[in-house]
Image (cartoon, rainbow, N blue to C red):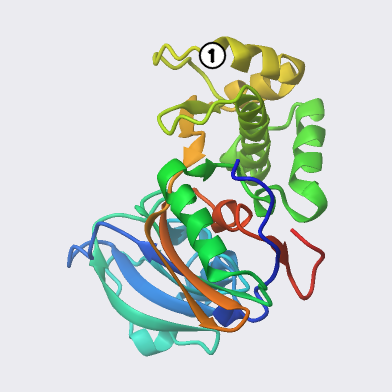
Amino acid sequence: MHGNALGKATFRQCPEDFNVHEIVDFEPSGEGEHLLVHIHKRDQNTQWVCGLLAELANINRRDIGFCGLKDRFAIATQWFSLHLPGKDIDLSQLQHDDFKILSSGRHNKKLRRGDHVGNRFSIRLRDFDIDFEQLSQRLNRIQQQGVPNYFAEQRFGWDANNLVKAQQLIVDGRLKGNRQGTGMYLSAARSWLFNLLLDQYLLLGNNNVEDTGALWGRGRSATGESFHETERQVLEPWADWCHAMEHAGLKQQRRAFILKPSSLTYQQVQEGQFELNFELPAGSYATAILREIAQLIRPEFKSL
């Protein structure tokens, strides 16, 4: 959308190069059956922390709630809820070497996916041999025009295995939603279809920040957008996937095609190293911004 990458940059050389902090618009209510804990973690994914909390609190894993998945190879802070009706717990019981509890409080409901407003990122790119003025010009355009709001690779699993599994479940007629343990694959398939729509949207030369695409499910949007007929044409070869999502009970939603960062700042911390700070709404990926700047090279992986 903004032209070729300005150059190659080392991405996530260490967890400290990628900081993500959850933004919420709530505080613990002070009473209720749930205990909210605000956790700082390093190099641990969200699901792993859920399992540890359930084990430490001696409760079922399904009684742990959270707003969104956070990257493993990172420094991250986020909220978790533990269902502890009528049960007081000593916070020292929940301490673990893999995370630190920053604060806590009683709350009147379980945290659900999407309960957060967004995420605040602080990211360091290394070995990025460019002129600061070049970076400044590119980031100014990104701030004004936005970037394509693609779902990133982690949504689809290692080697896109979540999509392979989704196809198998669809063929077998077993894609039934979260209750059958298939929610991750259902989400991956839905996200893949959105990315296909976004590909076509950009090919048509569109870049309106107000335009949205379908996250497929039952019902149809009443927005009257001219892109709807194109959506039908793009998704026609994927009719089996669309029918499976409707059968699983998903309701159709809309997702913005164009993503605009807020509170964007940047600085050169030393030669070849740049730090970027910005906020994104829930469900968006920092790599959508970074790929419009650099070809990302991870030390343990090939380029992204």
Q: Is residue 18 visible?
A: no
Q: In which image quadrant can residue 262 be found? A: bottom left
- Under circle 1, the secondary element is helix
Pick the quarter of the image with the C terminus.
bottom right
Q: Nearer the viewer, residue 301 or 249?
A: 301
Tell me which residue sits at (64%, 81%) in the image. 14
Give above or below for 179 relative to 64.
above
Which x, y percent locates residue 6?
Answer: 66, 59
Q: Nearer the viewer, residue 87 or 161?
A: 161
Left/right placement of residue 75 relative to residue 199 reads left
Give above or below for 205 relative to 154.
above
Tell me which residue sits at (22%, 61%) in the image. 32
Residue at the extreme left: 30
* Identity, as a three-letter code, of the amino acid under mark 1: His
Give above or below for 102 relative to 81.
below
Judging by the rendered image, the residue that carries numbered circle 1 is: 228
Tell me which residue sits at (36%, 73%) in the image. 38
Q: Nearer the viewer, residue 130 or 151?
A: 130
Q: Is residue 135 visible?
A: yes
Q: In which image quadrant can residue 191 be found? A: top right
For label 1, the crowd category at 10 Å Cα-Cα, with few meaning under 14, some 14 to 19 and many 20 or more, is: some
